[in-house]
Amino acid sequence: RRVNEQADNFTKKGTGSGGTLVRKAPEGGAAVGPAGAPAGSKFQAFMERPNPPNTEFRRFYERGDLPVQVDHGGVSNRIQWKVDIEKLDFHHYLPIFFDGLREIEDPYAFLAEQGVYDMIDVGWKKVLPVIPQLIIPIKTALNTRQKKVIVKVLKVLQRLVTCDFEGGHPLIGQALVPYYRQILPVLNIFIRQNDNLGDGIDYGQKNRENLGDLIMETLEAFELNGGEDAFINIKYLVPVYQSMVIS
């Protein structure tokens, strides 16, 4: 005998799995995705990684071995150097300050970031020989995959590849090309991380904290200052990047 189908036997709008491999949840449990992760959870590639407070910058600062301190005068805090920046040993101090870029706690985060800007702006002539020592701190900071840290590192990288313009022969951007394999993979992961506001207004745009836009700006700075081999190396590691020089 034929049984009439009831409306309850059909999938209703908004109740299906959308073609994904989501297995039916056991009684009292959550639905499980293909990798055993809860359905709808963030992809592992975008998850934040552990960022323990064990930087060299923190260790040296707490020991009193860094020639910086916070100047609390005025409207906002500033960094006060105890010695002339140009007299510093950049091979020793610059990697330590770069290691502090992944700090998220003050005063370490503030001093490390501002210290890096001061050193590469004032002592740009001493930066080029130190580039190989900066790669591991940069890679470690990017691999935390924390948006706040990545934004900070990207802004520093943009300043780094343009800081030797005064000399007329920018070489720092070219010196970074062999190390793209360490720097760019994380940028390739987050390059589509743009804020979709619809017809809304992003009032924080002046702070340049939109990760996708900031990554594109950084890659363009790399291409402009990296010489003739920059684009092909960027394209190999970030396939969606389109050259702003080659038409």
Image (tube, rainbow, N blue to C red):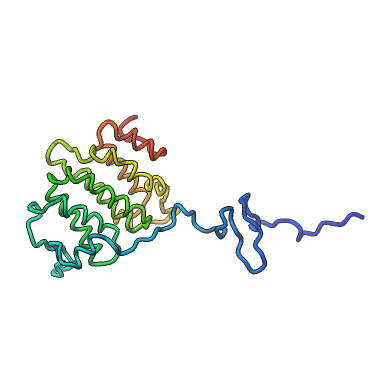
**Quarter the C terminus occupies:** top left
* Rendered-image quadrant of the N terminus: bottom right
Q: In the displayed structure, does residue 3 sit left or right of residue 34?
A: right
Residue 242 rendering spot, x and y as whole percentages: 37, 36
Quarter of the image for residue 105 reads bottom left
The image shows a total of numbered marks equal to 0
On the rendered structure, is 162 left or right of 246?
left
Residue at 30%, 33% in the rendered image: 245
**69 lies left or right of 99:** left
Residue 12, image quadrant:
bottom right
Of 162 and 176, nearer the camera is: 176
Foreground residue among 196 and 187 = 187
Measured along the vertical axis of the image, is residue 179 above or below residue 49? above
Picture coordinates of residue 113, whole percent (x, y): 23, 58
Place of residue 5 in the rendered image (x, y in percent of width and height, measured from the top left): 82, 56
**In the image, 183: left or right of 20?**
left
- The location of residue 238, given as percent across then percent down, is 39, 40
**Residue farthest along the right direction in this orientation:** 1
Q: Residue at x 25, y 33 (%)?
A: 227
Q: Which of the pair 233/15 is nearer the observer?
A: 233
The residue at 20%/43% (across/down) is: 162
Q: Quadrant of residue 48?
A: bottom left
